Image (tube, coloured by chain):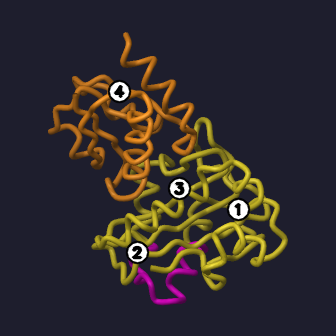
Amino acid sequence: MKFLEESLVALDIEVSQPEEAIREAGKLLLNLELIEQQYIEAMVASFQKNGPYFVLAPKIALPHARPEDGVAEAAVSLIRLNEPVRFGHASNDPVQLVFALAASSSEEHLQVLQKLMQLLGDENNVSKLLSAKSYQEINQLIGGNG
Amino acid sequence: MKILCVCGLGQGTSLILKMNVETVLNQLDIEADVENTDVSSASSENPDYIITSNELAQSLENHPAKVIIVNNYFDMNEIKEALQENMNS
């Protein structure tokens, strides 16, 4: 399991479209070979087919696809957008934090989601993620295990 | 009572919702069987309630189950209020 390690977090990324944001967040997973290229396309296709339902909370999107779309290991990456982008969600737009989830079929998938819920279930953590000036500040939020 | 949490793929989003719904049900002392699935499989299921986002609720409007909408999946208060409001009526 890889959860928001330093190489999986990128701050102040410039994008103008939701698809671009999904691809950028996916690229961080791909760089570490946690997913295959086709998983990124599957995330984008899911957005185009099912809409922005994965914008789970104000400012927060959690794009993902299925394990069979090419996942090597359960993981989450994060890109923080320089300028928030509209995904078309009625109440949670615009999005600034994009967490790409590599959904595996293993037990680790649940552990990754639980860690994510712990982090994002606390509004203070969300505002710290939005204002963090360096990866170190984010690392402290996730318990320094990145 | 059976509750189905629904998202586009049945992998991540609905699982997060399921875990938070279970927590809230525990707090409310309500016993229920909570499962998660994707929006296309939901039509062949027969739960008492479906919990999902506003975005997916439209494609479930013909489903016989009562559809409950949650906007912020991490806001336990919103989930609690949505459940209480819909289950009492």
Of helix, strand and loop, which one carries label 4?
strand
B48 left or right, relative to A51: left
Q: Residue A9, relative to residue A82: is it above or below?
A: below
Magenta segment, which residues? A24-40
* Of marks 4 and 2, the one in the foreground: 4
- Please identify the quadrant where the N terminus of chain B is shown: top left
Q: Position of residue B85 (x, y in %)?
A: 45, 17
Q: Amino acid at mark 1?
A: Ser
Verify CB contact (< 8 Å) between mark 4 and mark 2.
no
Q: Are dots 4 and 2 on a single chain?
A: no
Q: Nearer the viewer, residue A134 or A95?
A: A134
Between marks 4 and 1, how big is the CA–CA gap? 34 Å
Q: Earlier in the sequence, mark 1 or mark 2?
A: 1
Between marks 3 and 2, how big is the CA–CA gap? 23 Å
Q: Which mark is residue A39?
A: 2
Verify CB contact (< 8 Å) between mark 3 and mark 1.
no
Q: Amino acid at mark 3?
A: Met
* Of marks 3 and 2, the one in the foreground: 3
Q: Which mark is residue A117?
A: 3
- Dominant secondary structure of the residues highlighted in magenta in the image: helix
Of helix, strand and loop, which one carries label 2?
helix
Q: Are dots 3 and 1 on a single chain?
A: yes
Q: Chain of mark 1?
A: A
Q: Residue A46, relative to residue B71: is it above or below?
A: below
**Colour displayed for chain A in the image of the structure:** yellow
